[in-house]
Image (cartoon, rainbow, N blue to C red):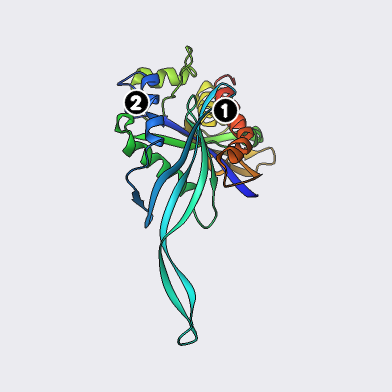
Amino acid sequence: MRKHHLYAVKLSINETLFSRPLKESKMHFLSAINTSGIFLKKYNSLWNFIDIAKEDIAGRNIVAGRILRGKDEGTNVVDTTDVKIKRNNVENVASWSNFIFDFATEIVIFEERVGKISKNQFIEVFKQMIEINAPELGELKYEFLPAAENLKGELKKLKVINYARFQLIPANWDDDDDFNELDKELKNLGTSEAVHEYKAKGTGLNPDSILIKKPVNMSLAGYGHFDVRGTDKDGMNKQVISNQELLFESVQSGDDIIEDFTRNYLSFLKKAIEQHIGASKNE
């Protein structure tokens, strides 16, 4: 048993979103993750998928597995001939991070291995390997899911909002209804990415405007991020940056058996899915 530090990331089909049906495109995720032939070279290391297992848990299609890293490392060894310490290079020293991927929401839960595989290294490699293994998906976008409740609390503390910037992508949304009115307009526009920036003086921006509320909700769901600035009730300057406050959890889990960490990651996956889906219904 050891402690696993978990993060949640929402992956999104972006480049090919308007060129083929979303459900058809999403099927390529399975073949992409289940492919472990060619090693990716990145961060002075070799990377690949290993130990992939497809599971049906509580009606959800989930893939569990590991990202493997091989990196040359130096280590101190004893030279018994000259009785001294010398430096030896060891090729492809192995480290790995466990993950579970939910097909319906395209959310991946994974562990950061501090000093071995950082959270940013993991998701960049994960994304790039999928793009290589399934070129039909085109370029993917991703966002770390933010700590929604913390961010909503911080936003409520702002008495005056003087500045707001939102960077958004159109949603990968399977429901019959649109994610929200703003997402509908992004799709009508045909944009792959949008940046909205608002400034105000005096009484500030209206926090109840849909131009604030809708992009905040899209960001909480994993379809963007925001930077909101203003002053609190005491007149102190405050800044709320969504991608600096991430959804996070630490769990104790075994590491050798896929079923062990899958079971122990499920509660965090459920929390991430609830936030992702719930953000579409927040007003």
Mark 1 → mark 2, Cα distance in angstroms? 25 Å
Pinpoint residue 141: horizontal percent, then vertical percent.
40, 35
- Compared to residue 68, the image places residue 132 above or below, namely above
Q: Secondary structure at mark 2?
A: loop
Dividing the picture into quarters, in which one does residue 191 lie? top left
Q: Which residue is mark 1?
A: 273
Dividing the picture into quarters, in which one does residue 188 lie? top left
Residue appearing at x 47%, y 27% in the figure: 103
Q: Which residue is mark 2?
A: 191
In the picture as drawn, the residue positioned furthest to the front comes out as 81
The amino acid sitting under disc 2 is: Thr
The amino acid sitting under disc 1 is: Ile
Quick one: label 2, few (<14), some, or many (20+) residues within 10 Å? some
Pinpoint residue 25: horizontal percent, then vertical percent.
36, 24
Residue appearing at x 59%, y 28% in the figure: 275
Residue appearing at x 55%, y 29% in the figure: 205
Is residue 21 rendered to the left or right of residue 164?
Answer: left
Q: Quadrant of the C terminus?
A: top right
Instruction: Work out whether mark 1 precedes mark 2 in sequence or the reverse, and give the earlier one.
Output: 2
Pinpoint residue 218: horizontal percent, then vertical percent.
50, 27
Q: Secondary structure at mark 1?
A: helix
In the picture as drawn, the residue positioned furthest to the top comes out as 176
Residue appearing at x 37%, y 28% in the figure: 28
In the picture as drawn, the residue positioned furthest to the bottom comes out as 82
Is residue 114 rendered to the left or right of residue 170?
Answer: right
Depth check, front residue: 241 or 250: 250
